[in-house]
Image (cartoon, helix red, strand yellow):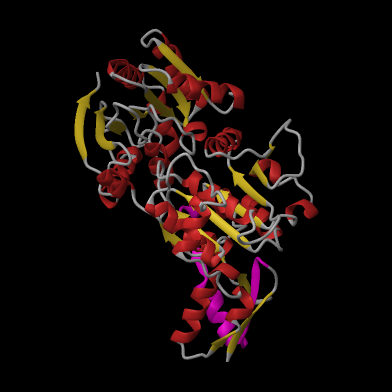
Amino acid sequence: MVRVSKIDDVFMKVHCDDGLARDLYDFFSFTVPNAKFMPSYKNKFWDGKVRLFSIKTKKIYIGLLPYVDEFCRERGFEFGGIEEVIGTKTKITDEDVDFFINGDDLIPGLGLPFQPRDYQIDAFKTAVQYGRQLLLSPTASGKSLIIYMLCRWYEGEMSLPNAKTVIIVPTTSLVEQMSKDFEDYGYNKKICKIYSGQPVFDSDITITTWQSFAKAPKNVLESFDIVIGDEAHLFKAQTLKGILEKMKHTGVRFGTTGTLDGSEVHRLQLEGLFGPVKKVISSYQLMEEGTIANLEIDCVILRHTKQKKMSYQEEMDYLVSSDSRNKFITNLVASLKGNTLVLFQYVEKHGEVLYPMLEGRVKDLHYVYGGTDTEDRETVREVVEKSEDSVILASYGTFSTGVNIKKIDNVVFASPSKSRIRNLQSIGRGLRKTEGKEKMRLFDIADDLQCDNFTLGHLKERINIYNEENFSYEIKQFDLD
């Protein structure tokens, strides 16, 4: 008989013999993708593996209970203690949800300015039933509304009276954006926003950057009843993981993200911290329904004169300093109609080079990078929303995740990347529909150095992603002088 017992709201203990513990240790050990390139691996301080089960303490994340259960049962062991670990799920009916959203003749509901979509209601209902969920839903699917509904459910008398919720986001811009979204949905209470320089006060809902929240004392971290991690794919980072592990008495946990990186260890880490994955809807389905703009992808391969084989960093340095390549990008951007988002990776090596080249070619140019403060970023967002022909030149780190600008007609990948998350999040920047906008064009720029070069290989990986997501694309080649 194998049984589990709850340690706190983060970990459980598996009561089993040492032989099965060794098997669990091996089963929940994963090689981290690209570990061999990391300094700790190169310096032999780390073997490149993440282990989710401790053979010494027999501890594992509560969120991985279904996998432990399946592992033991497949090997013929009886399994018990599940109820002690997760309790009973909340019973919630369609009538409960309808009353919560719409109210009745005597009691008002949420008072939303519009009716939530069916998939948003389904995601909300599933999350509330289980109290732990990792909601996988793409950009422009309305994740902020799902988050808002969850906050309001737990804030009211429907579930946990006087519950306090913290929403953790990656950037200061998203703190402000989420707060503004809540106001648009009709929320009229004061929201505590935590980031540099903001006053901290007691509130039903707190929205914070993870950088600020990581500095909070233990009693603050443990004071919240509900935690919601927006852009949850980032929570595999050590600091973010540490925050959730310290929230030992926060049993209600939800993560929302547009995409996972495709690796098993990434998914299991997040499921362990938040709960099982629920795929809410796909970008392709949203396009089919007409909810988001159609996507047209031009994979633009720039053929350079033959180069010798380089290291990855040498290749990147060559590309961002290539005058003919930067002129091609400048000419492309200047020729596009509508609002355009140009994304680059290196600020000094590439952003600072492209900015003066574009400055003389486009009418309304905005430059955003890590050093741009939150208020200025929000101003750029507001200005472009009212514009018809603006260009935002932005680093991936500031604009590839979470920024909500509906009026983006074109996205240009000025720097190559093979990151599944970064690519899909970046594409999402332009998929929101506005009046008169039915499509978004993505220009995915890759480079053929006529040798075995890295960035051409990265394009192949991105094309695999486009195929998986049912995105249509065309491949076009141009010779550089």
How many discs appear? 0
**From where the camera sits, is residue 48 visible?**
no
Quadrant where the C terminus lies? top left
User: In the image, what residue occupies the spot 29% across and 47% down?
Assistant: 284
Q: Is residue 256 left or right of residue 60?
A: left
Q: Which residues are magenta?
A: 9-36
Residue reaching furthest to the top: 360
Q: Is residue 356 left or right of residue 442?
A: right
- Up/down of 415 relative to 96, above or below: above
Q: Does the segment drawn in magenta span residue 33?
A: yes
Of 336 and 131, which appears nearest the observer? Answer: 131
Q: Is residue 462 left or right of residue 260?
A: left
- Up/down of 155 relative to 386, above or below: below
- Up/down of 217 relative to 477, above or below: below
Horizontal and vertical percent for residue 320? 41, 25
- Up/down of 319 relative to 168, above or below: above
Horizontal and vertical percent for residue 323? 36, 17
Quarter occupied by residue 413: top left
